[in-house]
Amino acid sequence: MQNISDFIKDVTGEKYSKCFDYLYGVKADKMPQRYIDAALEFGSLFGDGDIRVFSAPGRTEVGGNHTDHQKGCVLAAGVDLDIIAVAKKTDTNVIRIKSAGYDMDVIDLSILTPQKDEIEHAPALIRGVAARFKELGYEIGGFDAYTTSNVLKGSGLSSSAAFEVMVCTLLNHLYNDGKMDAVEAAIVSQYAENNFFMKPCGLMDQTACSVGGFVGIDFNDPANPVIEKVDFDFSAVNHSLCIVDTGGCHADLTNEYADIPAEMKQVAAFFGKEVLRQVNEEEFYKNIHKLRQNVSDRAVLRAIHFFGDNKRAVELKNALKNNDFEQFKSIIIKSGRSSLANLQNVFAASNPAEQGLTLALALTERILNGNGAFRVHGGGFAGTIQAFVPNEMLDEYKQQIESVFGDGSCHVLSIRPVGGVEITPELHK
């Protein structure tokens, strides 16, 4: 049992220092005040009581660029930006969640069906998670929670998946003693987004946020993806993960994103298949001359990217399993070059004058000068790139890249070893 004052006393002292070091690395010294502020805000909203504290991370796509929608393989990872929540159980049948910057979400658990007025809003995710918990035989019940997030919106770090995983983590620990494992929590999160929020997302984002660390996922059977957590100590390789926001606008890019799976499926259809994962690669290369009579050259190039990057996602996972970070970096660069030349998602064909991602990649290659690794991040066309930067070059890299894209455009992250968790003094290496 801990009330707010007890928690603040413990956080102010050394009781949680190992926990914060484990989750946040070099950012650990900034965490006590963040958690104290959250606890105080909870108290102002809901009063004191027996509080518990939780965290769920954002994620980054590391390997397998636009492979998931073709039932391919990906490598993703949890990062050290997260949503934190201060919560307490209540004897009501109502969930109340106040997220910083948003109105209070109030969910009556007597209604566990999709509500039209909640589509594409946070209450749909909360209700969907609770509904799936109950369908699977888990306990649900009321609680109050205050959440605050530093997961960057619009950066490809999956703030929505982190929120879904947080709701799972709250119900799992407050009412089920943590019995639901991380993979099942990811599947429950996806269910809520697909069936209540009404967004037809895949499972990569939720899995990386829920499991944490590096995670390899094979979507060959989307209903039963093969998920493998990779035990790799990123903190030991003297590199930082940088996500550079180039400031590009995502507006009017819907068709650009939609064209990628559509064109890949055109190639698959030529061979009588639904997606490229079902197409024999050798048959594809033998028939390119015939393909060109039926699909565009860009569709053929995008298929070439798929076949290469699907294998590279597995190679990246194996490089980490073999503790070969140099090999990992070389594969990242190959993946990035394929996205640029073959997948062609680094700038929009509809607006070729705007090439912030291409510029960021070119500058990164020049600054790192044969060191580190870099590639487009996420869906592409606008937004962010990813760079693995040697720590001794980090200050120089950040200064030079921000001189072009603006102060605060380079976000220095690390790979977080765990996903959705309860914050306790015992949580550490």
Image (cartoon, grey):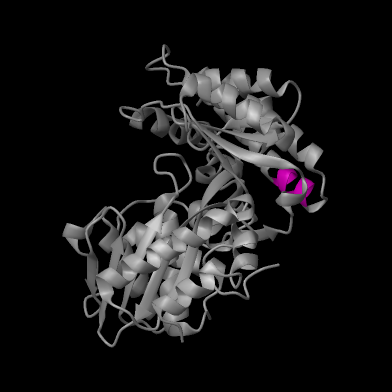
In the displayed structure, 274 sits above or below 404; it is: below
Q: Which residues are magenta?
A: 314-320
In the displayed structure, 293 sits above or below 255; it is: above
Name the spot of residue 28 as percent of width and height, x first.
Answer: 59, 56
Depth check: give the residue in front, 387 or 319: 387
128 with respect to 188 (left or right):
left
281 with respect to 198 (left or right):
right
Name the spot of residue 259 as percent of width and height, x first.
Answer: 42, 30
At a point 40% along the width and 40% down the height, the residue shown is 154
At a point 27% along the width and 74% down the height, the residue shown is 46
At a point 65% along the width and 26% down the height, the residue shown is 396
247 with respect to 26 (left or right):
left
69 with respect to 98 (left or right):
right
At a point 75% along the width and 40% down the height, the residue shown is 328
Depth check: give the residue in front, 303 or 212: 212
Residue furthest to the left: 117
Quadrant of the image for the C terminus? bottom right
